[in-house]
């Protein structure tokens, strides 16, 4: 039976819980995440690029002007956002003891669709700066123009809480291996 009395941002395994500085650094390091929204009891996941802005305690993403994510957020702005990575697989003598190294952060908050052109441009520019830091607006590409903001949606996720976890074992763990990528 699952214990629902713990706050949603509190990991069950305290030995794997990470503190705020670790969580912030992890959010800044990871390349993409999954946004989880809900509509009439049906959960939805969407992979997306993002940028975490510590000074605003927020995450920015962008997406289609119309579509499921926007409709879901308009109906219910509450969501969760997850970034994660898998490490080595850890064999054991029993099925119950096999494991995997991992790290993850789950963010809880509410999304806002940025309708103010200045705020939307700010969020979109933050995304461009994160993923294309070598390119400069006005030099390497045309600066964002109002017509572009009219065909994309920019979202700000205001973070209310988060949870970070990590499981890493010793480097010489017998038989540990990475999942084969084909």
Image: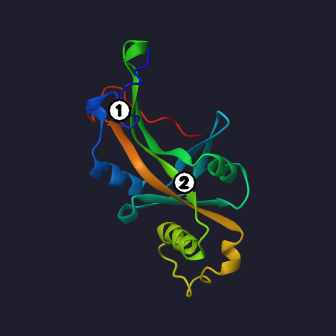
Instruction: Judge whether 52 appears above or below 166 on screen.
Output: below
Q: Residues within 10 Å of mark 2 (few under 14, many from 20)?
A: many
* x and y percentages locating residue 47 in the rendered image: 59, 48
* CB under 8 Å between discs 2 and 1: no
Task: Give the secondary structure at mark 1.
Answer: loop
Q: Residue at x 51, y 50 (%)?
A: 110
Q: Residue furthest top?
A: 94
Q: Quadrant of residue 58?
A: bottom left
Question: Taking 162 as reference, is 72 left or right?
Answer: right
Task: Give the secondary structure at mark 2.
Answer: strand
Q: Residue at x 62, y 68 (%)?
A: 115
Q: Nearer the viewer, residue 29 or 62?
A: 62
Q: CA distance from mark 2 to mark 1?
A: 23 Å
Instruction: Judge whether 3 appears above or below 49 on screen.
Output: above
Q: Is residue 90 visible?
A: no
Q: Residue at x 65, y 59 (%)?
A: 63
Q: Residue furthest bottom?
A: 139
Q: Residues within 10 Å of mark 1 (few under 14, many from 20)?
A: some
Instruction: Judge whether 17 appears above or below 24 on screen.
Output: above
- Circle 1 sits on which residue? 11
- Circle 2 sits on which residue? 111
* x and y percentages locating residue 125 in the rendered image: 53, 73
Question: Taking 19 as reference, is 2 left or right?
Answer: right
Instruction: Judge whether 59 appears above or below 97 on screen.
Output: below
Q: Residue furthest front?
A: 75
Q: Nearer the viewer, residue 156 or 101?
A: 156
Q: Which mark is residue 50?
A: none
Q: Quadrant of residue 177?
A: top left
Q: Is residue 140 visible?
A: yes
């Amino acid at each position: 039976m699952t214990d629902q009395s713990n706050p949603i941002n509190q990991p069950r395994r305290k030995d794997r819980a990470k503190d705020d500085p670790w969580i912030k650094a992890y959010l800044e390091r990871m390349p993409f995440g999954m946004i989880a929204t809900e509509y009439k009891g049906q959960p939805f996941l969407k992979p997306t690029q993002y940028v975490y802005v510590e000074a605003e305690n927020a995450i920015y993403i962008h997406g289609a002007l119309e579509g499921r994510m926007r409709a879901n957020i308009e109906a219910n702005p509450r969501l969760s956002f997850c970034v994660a990575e898998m490490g080595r697989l850890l064999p054991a003598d029993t099925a119950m003891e096999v494991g995997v190294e991992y790290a993850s952060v789950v963010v809880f908050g509410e999304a806002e669709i940025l309708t103010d052109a200045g705020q939307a441009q700010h969020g979109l520019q933050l995304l461009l700066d994160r993923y294309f830091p070598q390119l400069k607006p006005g030099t390497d590409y045309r600066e964002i123009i109002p017509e572009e903001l009219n065909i994309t949606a920019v979202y700000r996720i205001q973070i209310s809480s988060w949870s970070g976890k990590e499981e890493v074992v010793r480097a010489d763990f017998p038989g540990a291996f990475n999942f084969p990528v084909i």
